[in-house]
Image (cartoon, grey):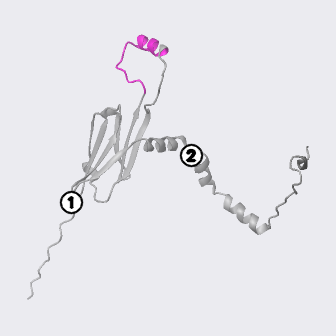
């Protein structure tokens, strides 16, 4: 090997010595529990896809006196391509998937030939999974949810459960 002294003339060799307790503290800070490490280093593919899908699915949430309304852009999706579900009793889950090249069906052979000749000059429109999850408040009526998709905009209406009637004072007859 080459002598480092020739590269940095006049540089003194510096050595660091750690006393044992400090070193073990540093090591224990750096060691992460296995489960955490797995999550940090290699999250599952579906987890990554879901996270990306949520980030790319913008939503507006409005509260009205009698309902909550969720408005989401679902570009290029028809009503039958969108899934609206309630998970665990109070999580509103909205998902769909958009595929590339939604032309009306041509004759298959013609289409394949045309596709082989076509090349993308620009590919900016997002395809893939669209997804959002919302935890509903306690006063949401999960049994009466309605969803309408029109012109690529999904509107999900969640009615509120009416507040309980205040109990009227009960008069007890004094005998």
Q: Residue at x 32, y 32 (%)?
A: 78
Q: Residue at x 24, y 56 (%)?
A: 160
Q: Which residue is drawn at 72% across and 61% down?
A: 27
Q: Mark 1 points at which residue?
A: 162
Left or right of 115, for residue 60: left
Q: Which of 165 and 58 is in front in this view?
A: 58
Q: Residue at x 47, y 27 (%)?
A: 123
Task: Return the x and y of residue 79 as percentages of the image width and height.
Answer: 30, 34
Q: Which of marks 1 and 2 is nearer the N terminus?
A: 2
Circle 1 SS class: loop
Task: Return the x and y of residue 161 as percentages of the image width and height.
Answer: 23, 58
Separation of marks 1 and 2 at Cα, in angstroms: 42 Å
Left or right of 31, for residue 13: right
Q: Nearer the viewer, residue 154 or 82?
A: 154
Circle 2 SS class: loop
Which of the 4 image quadrants contains residue 80? top left
Q: Quadrant of the N terminus?
A: top right
Q: Nearer the viewer, residue 77 or 171?
A: 77
Q: Mark 2 points at which residue?
A: 43
Query: In the rendered image of this protein, does residue 55 appear above or below residue 175?
Result: above
Q: Residue furthest front?
A: 10
Residue range in magenta is: 100-116
């Amino acid at each position: 090997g080459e002598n480092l002294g020739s590269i940095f003339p006049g540089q003194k060799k510096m050595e660091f010595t750690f006393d044992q307790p400090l070193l073990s503290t540093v090591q224990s800070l750096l060691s992460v529990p296995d489960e955490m490490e797995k999550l940090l280093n290699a999250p599952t593919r579906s987890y990554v896809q879901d996270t990306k899908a949520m980030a790319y699915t913008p939503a507006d949430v409005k509260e009205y006196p009698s309902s909550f309304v969720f408005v989401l852009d679902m570009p290029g999706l028809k009503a039958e391509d969108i899934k609206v579900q309630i998970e665990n009793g109070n999580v509103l889950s909205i998902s769909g998937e958009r595929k590339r090249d939604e032309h009306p069906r041509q004759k298959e052979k013609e289409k394949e030939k045309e596709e082989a000749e076509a090349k993308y000059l620009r590919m900016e429109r997002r395809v893939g999974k669209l997804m959002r999850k919302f935890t509903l408040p306690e006063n949401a009526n999960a049994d009466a949810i309605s969803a309408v998709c029109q012109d690529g905009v999904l509107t999900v209406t969640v009615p509120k459960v009416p507040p309980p009637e205040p109990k009227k004072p009960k008069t007890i007859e004094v005998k």
